[in-house]
C-alpha cells in the first residue's frame, strides 16, 4: 500500500511540473477606456491608453 501511494504522489508531482504555467499578469491595475462617437479611446487622469498583447486597449498608469 505504501508503494502505491508513493507512486501516485510521484506521478502527481511529475504532472504538476509539466503542466502549462499560469497566465502572466500585467503587474499594474488597468482601466477600460471610454470611447467617443468616433472610436477614440480616452483615459482618466494620470493614465494613458495602451494596447496589450491580446489586442485589447486598456488604460495604464503613467510613470511621472
Image (cartoon, helix red, strand yellow):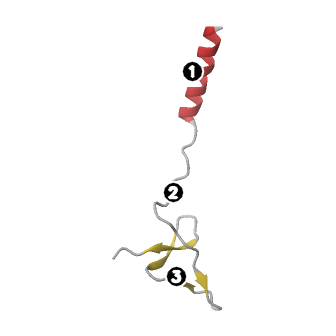
Q: Nearer the N terminus, badge 3 or badge 2?
A: 2
> What SS does tag 3 mark?
loop
Tell me the residue at 57%/42% (across/down): 20
The extreme left residue here reads: 64
Neighbour tally class for label 1: few under 14, some 14-19, many 20 plus, Cα within 10 Å: few
Choose the circle earlier in sequence order: 3 or 1. 1
In the rendered image, the vertical position of residue 21 relative to residue 55, given as above or below: above
Q: Residues within 10 Å of mark 2 (few under 14, many from 20)?
A: few
Secondary-structure class at tag 1: helix
- At mark 2, the secondary structure is loop
- In the picture, the quarter occupied by the N terminus is top right
Residue located beneath label 1 in the image: 10
* Residue 27 in the figure: left or right of residue 58: left
The residue indicated by pointer 3 is 43
Mark 3 and mark 1: span between their CA atoms? 50 Å
Q: Which quadrant would the C terminus be assigned to in this image?
A: bottom left
Q: Report, in whole angstroms, how far the alpha carbon at label 1 lies from the one at label 2.
A: 30 Å
Tell me the residue that label 2 is attached to: 25
Callout 3 crowding tier (Cα within 10 Å): few <14, some 14–19, many ≥20: some
Q: Which residue is depicted at the point 65% across and 12% down?
A: 4
The CA span between labels 3 and 2 is: 21 Å
Give 55 or 33, whichever is nearer the viewer: 33
User: Which residue corresponds to the image point at 57% horizontal and 33% vertical from the top-left?
Assistant: 16
> Looking at the image, do the residues carrying marks 1 and 2 touch, with CB atoms under 8 Å apart?
no
3 or 1: mark nearer the eye = 3
Amino acid at each position: 500500500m505504501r508503494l502505491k501511494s508513493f507512486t501516485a504522489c510521484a506521478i502527481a508531482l511529475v504532472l504538476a511540473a509539466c503542466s502549462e504555467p499560469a497566465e502572466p499578469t500585467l503587474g499594474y491595475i488597468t482601466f477600460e477606456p471610454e470611447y467617443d462617437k468616433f472610436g477614440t479611446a480616452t483615459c482618466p487622469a494620470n493614465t494613458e491608453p495602451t494596447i496589450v498583447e491580446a489586442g485589447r486597449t486598456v488604460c495604464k498608469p503613467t510613470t511621472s
